[in-house]
Image: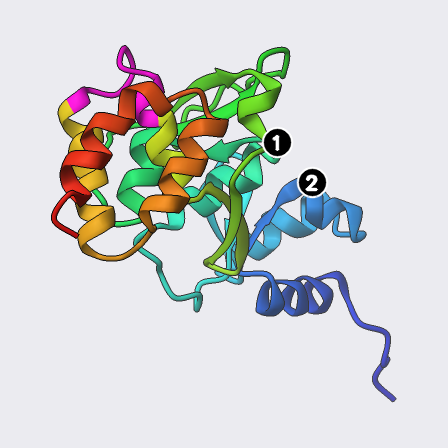
Amino acid sequence: MPSSIPTQQDRLHSIIKTTPLVTAYELRKQGITGAAISRAEASGLITRLSRGLYQGPQSEYDTNQTLAEIAKKVPNGVICLVSALAYHGLTDQMPRTAWVAIAQDAWAPKLTYPPIRYVRFKPKYLTEGIEYHTISGVSVPVYSVAKTLADAFRNPRLVDRSIAIEGLKNALAAHKATPSQIYEAAQKGGALNTIKPYLEALTSNG
């Protein structure tokens, strides 16, 4: 009589069905050995995306999947600045590296892929305006539209002013943030004096 006890491959298959992106660490925490992971990769049960990160072969690809991979590898980071502008559809700029905000004293994992540009935020700027978006089955922290605009205007050495203005125009035109939301985020984010003239000019006929 065949055994009803699930094998490691059975458990791994069940995990992949509910968690499209999974790290080797997460698999090991659930009792999957390194050898079982290697066998699953060899048999095509899972696909290795990068070191220590795997995906089920039937998982649908999301154009923002890189952000999900980053969320798995940098759990204390938040997608910010140009990457957040691009995610929200506020710029045509496609950053070659992903912009990730971390604490000033946080450890910054060195990854070969995906390429990351870390930005160290002060505590008062790090925790405000975080939203969670599901990408490839992963809950990814991304700064809100209003918070991202405040950050972009506050950091002219990191984000070109033309990109920040483009993001502001697009956010208002697409109604992705109200003037009051942007004003409040800029006030909290230390960017009010910088963004206010542009905000007033773009909303003066509204």
Asked whether 68 or 33 is in front, the reply is 68
* Residue ID for mark 2: 25
Q: Residue at x 45, y 28 (%)?
A: 187
Give the mark toward the camera: 2 or 1.
Answer: 1
Q: Is any atom of residue 5 visible in this view?
A: yes
Residue 100, image x and y in percent? 45, 28
Q: Residue at x 63, y 49 (%)?
A: 37
Q: By what rule are the colours in the image chosen?
A: rainbow
Asked whether 39 or 152 is in front, the reply is 152
Asked whether 22 falls inside the magenta stretch, the response is no
174 relative to 58, above or below: above
Q: CA distance from mark 2 to mark 1?
A: 16 Å
106 relative to 62, above or below: above
Q: Amino acid at mark 2?
A: Tyr
- Compared across the picture, whether 117 is left or right of 93 comes to right
Asked whether 157 falls inside the magenta stretch, the response is yes
Label 2 close to label 1 by CB (< 8 Å):
no
* Residue ID for mark 1: 76
> Is the stretch drawn in magenta largely helix, strand or loop?
loop
- Compared across the picture, whether 53 is left or right of 24 comes to left
Q: Amino acid at mark 1?
A: Asn
Q: Residues within 10 Å of mark 2 (few under 14, many from 20)?
A: few
Q: Give the mark nearest the N terminus, 2 or 1.
A: 2
- Compared across the picture, whether 201 is left or right of 90 comes to left
Position of the N terminus by quadrant: bottom right
Give the magenta-colored segment's residue range: 152-161
* SS assignment at label 1: loop
Residue 18, image x and y in percent? 61, 68
Residue 34, image x and y in percent? 69, 42
Residue 90, image x and y in percent? 23, 45
100 relative to 121, above or below: below
